[in-house]
Amino acid sequence: MQLEFVRIEEANDLLNQLIEHHPHSIFLIDHDFKIKFYNKAFKKLTKRDKADILEHEFCEIMGCTKPNQGSFDNTNNQLKELLSGSLSELTLIRNFNVRNKTVTKHLRIEGHRVVMDGHKFRLVIIEDRTQKH
C-alpha cells in the first residue's frame, strides 16, 4: 500500500506520530553529539526530563563516561564510531549510570545519516534487549 499526501504537513504529522510512538528509543544528534530530538521511549530508557536530554550527549545522559576523561572513555570507542558514522550497527552490553544507579543494559544500536536543511545529523535507534536476556 502506498500513501499519498495532499500536503507536506500530513506527511510530517504521520512521520512525527510514528517516531513518537515507536517502541524503540530514537534520538537525533548533531556533529557535536548533542541530542536535538528524542521520542518517548528514549525518555523512558534514560529516566530523564527534557532539560536533562536536549543539548546533552548520549554518554553524558547515560553515564557511560568516566569523570575527567572527556565524552568517551577507552571502552566506548565503538559507541563513538557509531555516533560519528563510522559504524552503522552495534550490540552493546555494559553498565550505565541511570539516575545514580548502575544498570547493566543489553542494547542493539543503529545509526543512520540524515541531512536536513543542509545540516548533517545521526538518527540513532536503540532496541533495549535487557529484559529479553
Image: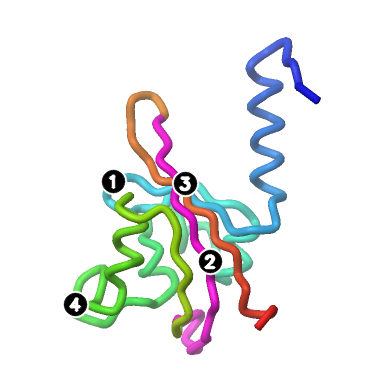
| Mark 3 or 2, nearer chain start | 2
Q: Which mark is residue 69?
A: 4
Q: Nearer the viewer, mark 2 or mark 4?
A: 2
Cβ–Cβ under 8 Å for marks 3 and 4: no
| Mark 3 or 4, nearer chain start | 4
Label 2: which secondary element: strand
Which residue position holds label 2?
108
* Rendered residue at 63%/16% (across/down): 8
> Which segment is the magenta one?
96-115
- Which amino acid does the dot numbered 4 rest on? Gln
- Which amino acid does the dot numbered 3 rest on? Leu
Instruction: Residue 85 in the image: state x and y as whole percent.
Output: 33, 50
Quadrant showing the C terminus: bottom right
Q: Where is 21 relative to 132, above or below?
A: above
Q: Which mark is residue 115?
A: none
Which residue position holds label 1?
31
Number of residues whose C-alpha sits closer than 10 Å to that of mark 4, classed few (under 14), some (14–19) or many (20 or more)? few
Q: Main structural element of the magenta stretch: helix, strand or loop?
A: strand
| Mark 4 or 1, nearer chain start | 1
Q: Is residue 23 magenta?
A: no
Q: Is residue 113 magenta?
A: yes
Task: Tell me how far mark 1 sits from mark 3, CA to CA.
Answer: 12 Å
Q: Nearer the viewer, mark 3 or mark 2?
A: 2
* Rendered residue at 56%/53% (across/down): 26
* Snapshot quadrant of residue 59: bottom left
